[in-house]
Amino acid sequence: MSRLKILHPLRLDAFPAVDLALQEPNGLLAMGGDLSVARLLDAYRHGIFPWYSADDPILWWSPDPRMVFATDRLHVPRRLQRWLRQCDWQIRADHAFRDVMSACAEPRDAGGGTWITEEMLNAYNALHNAGHAHSVEVYDGEILLGGIYGVAIGRMFFGESMFSRATNASKVALIGLCRALHAWGFALLDAQVTSAHLQTLGAREISRRDFIAHVEDYVQRVDQIGHWRERFGQHIVRDLF
């Protein structure tokens, strides 16, 4: 921990260069500071994100390699495609941002914890209200079945977490998000750290250097700031296939 920069909670310190991040644990770069909208936006613009447990200080990460989706290359297996063509669930965006985050915070295993603390919920809800954090939701009628949320800056989307209360619901949210992002000119969706499950859906690893080069380009590209309700619209899943 001795190499880590300690960020001041009352001023917007510059983050260290990401190539100074630790190799073990992979990508740990700095600690402290706060979760203000300004600091979160500054972090994401530099390929950095917060991730910590309730009893830890705020920890800031930029792992190497980085896992990403090309938004036009999501892998949808044929069996899933056949199922989706019969699915009458609805996909919307930014109708239930805090509900999606809260569902993502639910422990996945009995006795498990979560890194999505109340502090994180409040911080990202503020980021959502500022027009930079978004959710894509999957509904059966008015029942929320699954969703995904993350942060959009320029034409770069940084995925944070997703959840599912029914088989395939999180996959549907991811498919809906990628299709919208591709249509809007977002080439990449950041998935942060390596996951075998995400790799089955088409995610791939790239070096941190290449990732940062993409981020520096895409965050400078002009795009809308604000909620996505009207922009995204509402879609019946079967109509997308």
Image (spheres, rainbow, N blue to C red):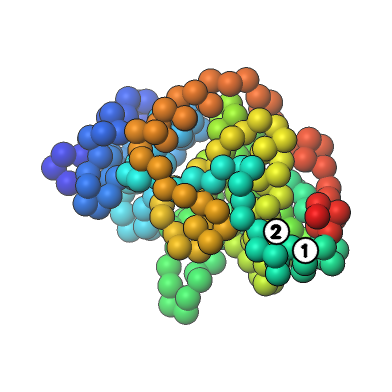
Give the labeled residue for mark 1.
Answer: 84
- Tell which of 175 and 48 is nearer to you: 175
Give the CA separation, mark 2 to mark 1.
8 Å
Helix, strand or loop at disc 2?
Answer: helix
Give the labeled residue for mark 2.
Answer: 172
Helix, strand or loop at disc 1?
Answer: helix
Say few, some or many: other residues with alpha carbon within 10 Å of mark 2 (under 14 / 14 to 19 / 20 or more).
Answer: many
Identify which amino acid the numbered label 2 is placed on: Val
Residue 9 seen in render: no
Tell whether 170 sits left or right of 202.
right
Identify which amino acid the numbered label 1 is placed on: Leu
Where does residue 181 sit, x and y in percent of width and height?
Answer: 66, 38
**Residue furthest out toward the bottom:** 110
Where does residue 149 sit, x and y in percent of width and height?
Answer: 60, 49
Where does residue 215 sit, x and y in percent of width and height?
Answer: 47, 30
Which quadrant of the figure contains the C terminus?
bottom right
Q: Do the residues under discs 2 and 1 have CB atoms within 8 angstroms?
A: yes
Q: Where 9 sits versus 142, above or below?
A: above
Measuring 74% from the left and 63% from the top, which residue is drawn there? 81
Measuring 50% from the left and 63% from the top, which residue is drawn there? 197
Q: Where 89 sits versus 112, above or below?
A: above
- Tell which of 46 and 198 is nearer to you: 198
Measuring 70% from the left and 32% from the top, which residue is drawn there? 184
Tell whether 152 sits left or right of 177.
left
